[in-house]
Image (cartoon, rainbow, N blue to C red):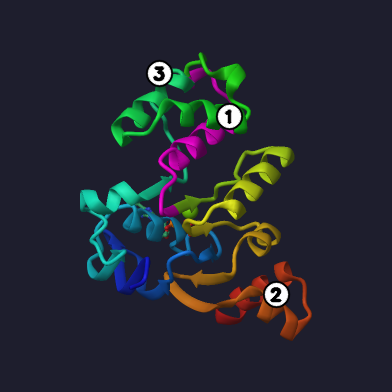
Amino acid sequence: MYCIELKNVVKKYGEVIALNGVSFNINCGEKVALLGPNGAGKSTILKLLAGLLKPEKGEVLVKGLDPFFIEARKIIGYLPEDASPYLMLNVRENLEYIASLRGVDKDRVDKLLDFLGLRQYENTRIVYLSKGNKQRLALALALLHDPEILLLDEPLNYLDIPTREKVISLLKSMNSTMLISTHIMSIAERLVNRAVILSNGKVVWQDDLTELKKSSGEEIESLVARLMEDVN
Ligand SMILES: Nc1ncnc2c1ncn2[C@@H]1O[C@H](COP(=O)(O)OP(=O)(O)O)[C@@H](O)[C@H]1O
Ligand SMILES: [Mg+2]
């Protein structure tokens, strides 16, 4: 069984066709990057997998389950594109609240506070946090239950370089199945085995990144840009 499966998925927002027959699979334990220009449909795919939206056509499965089911939600960690933790709570309260819902030990909260450099802000309310620190908290919330399946929408946005490096090495060390949308190719290249490239709501290319680079000798950034242009 695949950990992530999309079969001929069509998703519309009114008249706008965001996904137009998307199919791809991810094996358990694989780390895959979702690449593509703005508006390609990356966030829509992650929202479908997180159970926030339903497709008009086709099938979206997480370990064979409909993402709307609680059994699926338990094993998923999702970092949304514009994370909005509870604004009236402070950093620690947000983490402890989700930890209690997820049945996670308090030790894990402290571990993530330290790891992501949030200790000094633990009593700060979200409304007073910078974008970067909000992103750190959103990551901690997604990682809290050490999920089997991680859906990360532009996880490195707003983070400073040292924090980016920390997060990359943390994600690399985890055994979770990951689907990560990013437009930073050099980072995708370091983090994942495989990439799925989207354009206009369709998969235009998917394969092993290292193989592709070996065969073309091009830098990954220009290579991906060229692949996206070729199809337009
Ligand atoms: N809530 C929405 N209402 C209407 N159109 C939307 C909505 N969300 C996304 N879209 C449209 O769907 C397409 C795909 O968007 P999205 O999945 O956010 O792409 P990406 O994450 O690759 O930038 C875009 O054309 C976008 O404008
Ligand atoms: Mg997006």
How far apart in space, not on screen, are marks 3 and 2 (Cα)?
A: 44 Å
Res 135 → quadrant: top right
Magenta-tinted stretch? 126-150
Quarter in which the N terminus is drawn: bottom left
Point out which mark residue 116 bears.
none
Is 47 positioned to the left or the right of 192 in the image?
Answer: left
Q: Amino acid at mark 1?
A: Asn
Say whether mark 2 is within 8 Å of ligand 1.
Answer: no
How far apart in space, not on screen, are marks 1 and 2 (Cα)?
A: 33 Å
Point out which mark residue 89 bears.
3
Residue placed farthest to the bottom in the image?
215
x and y, in percent, of residue 22 in the image: 37, 74
Residue 165 drawn above or below residue 108:
below
The residue where tag 2 is placed is 223
x and y, in percent, of residue 58 in the image: 25, 73
N-terminal-most mark, 3 or 2: 3
The residue where tag 1 is placed is 133
